[in-house]
Image (cartoon, helix red, strand yellow):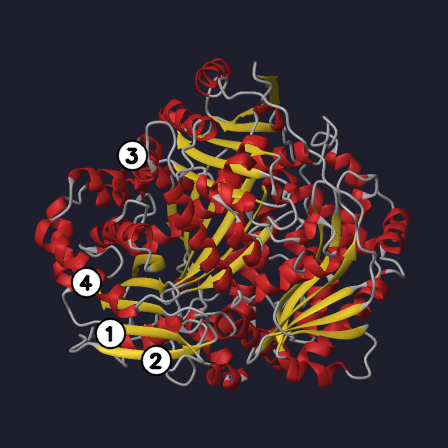
Amino acid sequence: MKFDRSKKPSITSKLIFKMPSHDKFVLKNNLDVYFIKKDVLPIIKINIIIYAGSKFEQPGKKGISNLLTMCIDEGAGEFDSLQLSEQFDLLGVQFSVSGNNDTIQLTLQTLKENFGKALELIGKILISPHFDEKDFKREKRKILTSLKQLKDDPDYLASTSFKSLLFGKRNPYSFPFLGLEKDINSITNKEVVSYYQNYIFPNNSFIVIVGDISNKELRENLDKYVSSWKTGNFDAQFKSTDKSDEKVVYIVDKKDSVQTEIRTGHHAAKRNSKDYFPKHLLNTILGGQFSSRINLNLREKQGYTYGAGSSYNYFKDSAYFSVSTSVGIENSANALNEIFKELNKIRDGVTEEELKFAKSSIVRKFPLSFETNSQVTSNFIGKVIYDLPDDYFDSYINNINSVTIEDVNKAAQESIFPELATTVLVGDKEKLIPQLEGKDFGKVEVINNF
Amino acid sequence: MKLLNISYEKYKLDNGLEVILHQNKNLPMVAVNIWYKVGSAQEVKGKTGIAHLFEHMMFQGSENVAKEMHFRYIQEAGGTLNGSTSFDRTNYYEKGPSNFLEVALWLESDRMGYLLPALDQDKLDNQKDVVYNERLERYDNQPYGLAWELLITNLYDKSHPYSWSTIGFADDIKNYTLADVKNFFRTYYAPNNATLVIAGDFKRDKAVSFVEKYFADIKNAQIVVPLKISNGKLTQNKIIRHKDNVQLERIYLSWLSDKAYGKDDAALDILSDLLTGSKNSRLYKTLVFEKEIAQDVTAFQFSGKYGGHFTIVATVKPGKSIDEIKTKIFNIISDLIKNGISSKELEKSKTGIKSSFIFSLQNLDSLADHLNSYNFYLNEPNSFSYDLERYNKVEEEDIIHVTDKYLSNPYIELRVVPKDNES
C-alpha cells in the first residue's frame, strides 16, 4: 500500500467525553462532602482538606502547622504511633498527611473492601489524636534535621528563597510550609495542640471522595466515623500585604555549585480572576509545556539546560508568575538574558498559529486529566479552594475556545512584567557576580546564608 | 484475581515488529508504548550514555517530521509523551484522546524507519549540551547525586554492562560523534528489535490497519547477538569514601543479588519492605523511630535482565555515629537470619503489595508499559497475576534464606561525607 508519508494524518473524529458528575452534601457537623463515583476499579480515594496551612501561623511560630501534620498521626484513639501505622499496613492502605501555605490535607487510598475501616482510622486521627510529648520531641528533631539537609538542595533553596524575597516578610505566604529553624526551636507540644484546637474543625474543612462506593454506603460510613468530629469557632483571618515588585537579582551563594538554579518573576492576579483563561493560554505559549517558547529557546536552541518553563502559581488568596530553570554555571547570565528576551517579546503579542496550537492542546488533553482517582480528586479540591463556579468543568472547553488573540495579547501586557521581576540565582557567587556586571537584570544583592 | 487478568492480542508483522493490543474502554483515550530492546547494557567503554543520548535524538524529528514538530504534533492532538532509558531497554510512550492514535503511530513509525535522513551535527551538538546539563542537574549538582554511579561502578565486575550508569560518564557524553549515533541507530533501531503496545479505547481493526500502513514498509535489521554476561562475584568488602556538598553523612551498603524475575527477586523485594517499608519495619523502627541515630533509612532490590543488587541506605543524624548505624544494621540482619520473621510481618507486606498492584491499574500509560515489560522479561504480556503470585508464594523461610544467601556476602560500603568534615 503506497501512501504519502510526508502528510500528517488529520484528526477528524470528534471525541465524546462525559464529565464525571459529582454529588455534594453536608454532614450534620457541617463538613462539606464532595463525592464523585468512579467504579472502573474497586478502589477509593479520600482527601480531607483543612484550612489550617502555614499562613495562619503567628510571627515567631513558623513551622507549627507542619509540626501538626507530622504529629497528628503519631497515635490516635486506642492506638499509639506504631500501632496506628500498623493498622494502615494491615489494610494495605496508603495514608499520608501533608500541607502547604493554605491547607493541611489527609490523603488515603484504599481498596473498596477496607473503606469503612480506613475511614474509621481517619476519624480517630481527626477526633482523638494523642499529641504525646515524646512523639512531638522526636518529630521536632526530625524536622530540624530535614531543614539542615534541605540547605543542600538547590531546587528547594531556589524556590523557597524566591518566594520569600518576592512576598517579603510581612506576607504569610512568603514563609516555607516546613517553617523556620529558629522558630521551630521554640515551638512546644502545647502550642501544636492549641493550633489543632483552633483550626481542626469540620466546619473549616471539606472532604472529597472519589471511587467505587454507593452514595448510601458512603453516607452511612461518614455518619458513623466522621460526624462526631465537633464543630468549633475559629479565626480564619490573616493579613496578606504584598510587597511591591522591584527589579532585583539576589544571589544565594552556594559554593562549588556546578549549576545555577534560576527563578524569576513577580506577583499576579488570583486564580479566580477573570483573565485566568487568557493567561492560561498565554503561559502555554510562553513556557507551560515542552514546545513553548522558553524551553525551545533555552533547551532546544541554546542547549543551556535540561528544561525551562514558566507558570502562574496560585495560592488561595494570592498568586505569582515565575520562570524556572537550572543551567550550567557559565551560562547563567546568558540564560537570564534569553529569559528576559522572551518575556519582553511575548508582550509584543502571540501569533494566531500559536494560539490555535495552545487551544488545541489544552482542549484535547482535557479528558486525560480525569483518568486516575488522584487526578479527579485534585481537580475538585482546586475548584473548592479557589472558589470556582459550579459549572467550571462543564464550561471549561468553551471558556478556552472563546478566548481571542486580543484577550491573550491584553493578558501579556497586563500580567507579564520583566521590568519588575525579582530574580534569584542559587549558585557560586564568585562565578556569578562577574557574569552580571554591566547587565540590566536589576541591582545585585548577595545573600550568603539563606 | 480476575481484575488482574488483562486481555490482549499479540502478533508480528513480516518485518518482525511485535504488536500487542489491549482494549480498555474506560475513558476515550489511548496509550502507545514502544520498547526497543536496547539500553545502556549494549554500550561499549568510552561511549557510555549513548543509548540515553539516542533517546533524546529520537525527539529531534525524522525524515517527514521537522525538528520540534514531534512534540508539537502530539501536544496539538492533546497528548502527552516521553521516553526513558534503562540498563535493559529504551521506551517511548504517548497517551492522548482516542482520535490521536493515527498521528502517534505515524510519528513512531517515521522515527523507527526514517530517522537518519534528518539527523545532523547541529542537532547532535545541541542534545549533547542538553544531556550534559541533565547530568549536572540530576547527578553532579544533587546532594548525594553521584552515589548510584559510585555504587554500581564498584559493585559490578568491570566487564559487566551494569558497571556504568545510563546517563553516561561526563567525558563520554562530550565525545560521541555523528557516526557513533548513526551506527547505534542502524544496529538497534529496527522493527525486529521492538515491541509496540497499543492500549485503551480504539477500534481493533482500525488499529491493525494503521500499524500495517505505517510500520510494514520499515526494513528489519540484522538480529543483534545477545549479550554474554559473566556475573563476577565480589570477593571482599570494599569501602569507598566520597566527599560531597552535603550537611549529613550517609552510608550505603550494597550486595550483588538476583536478576529480575529470578527465583529470589520477589523475596528480596519483600525483604526490603520488611526492613524499611513502614514505621514498624525493622530498620526504620530501630534506627529512626527508637534510637534516632538515622534521619532516614531505605532498602531496595534493584533487578534487571542481567543482574541485580540489594542496597540499604541510611542518613546519619547530626552528632550520631555512622559506625553505630552500620553495626546496628548488621545486628538486625543477623537477628533476622537467626530468629526469622513473624507471619504478621509477612502478611502486611503482601497486603501492601496486592493493593499497590490494583492502584497501579488506574493509569493507562503505566498499564501499557507493564504489558511491554512483562512481554520483555517473561514473554507474556498478561503476567499481572503471575507477578503478584510470585509475592504471595514467598514464605517466612524464604526471607531467611535470601537474607543469608545474599546479605552475608562481601559488600560495597559507600560513605558520603561533608566536604569540610575530615573525620
- Along the viewing direction, whichever of B56 and B217 lies nearer the viewer: B56
Which quarter of the rendered picture does the C terminus of chain B lie within? bottom left
Residue underneath mark 2 = B423
Which quarter of the rendered picture does the N terminus of chain B lie within? top left
Amino acid carrying label 2: it is Ser
Chain hosting mark 4? B
Q: Residues within 10 Å of mark 3 (few under 14, many from 20)?
A: some
Identified at 33% across, 74% down, the residue is: B415
- Along the viewing direction, whichever of B261 and A84 lies nearer the viewer: A84
Q: Which of pointers 4 and 1 lies earlier in the amino acid sequence? A: 1
Of the two numbered discs 4 and 1 in the rendering, the one whose residue sits closer to the viewer: 4
Q: CA distance from mark 2 to mark 3?
A: 43 Å
Which image quarter: residue B299? bottom left
CB atoms at circles 2 and 4 under 8 Å apart? Answer: no
Mark 2: which secondary structure?
loop
| Discs 2 and 4 carry the same chain letter | yes
Residue underneath mark 3 = A90
Answer left or right for A346 relative to B347: right
Decide: is B16 above or below A106: below
Q: CA distance from mark 4 to mark 1?
A: 34 Å
Amino acid carrying label 1: it is Lys
Q: Residues within 10 Å of mark 2 (few under 14, many from 20)?
A: few
Chain hosting mark 1? B
Q: CA distance from mark 1 to mark 2?
A: 43 Å
Q: Which of pointers 1 and 2 lies earlier in the amino acid sequence? A: 1
CB atoms at circles 1 and 3 under 8 Å apart? Answer: no
Residue underneath mark 4 = B330
Q: Position of residue A161 (x, y in %)?
A: 65, 62
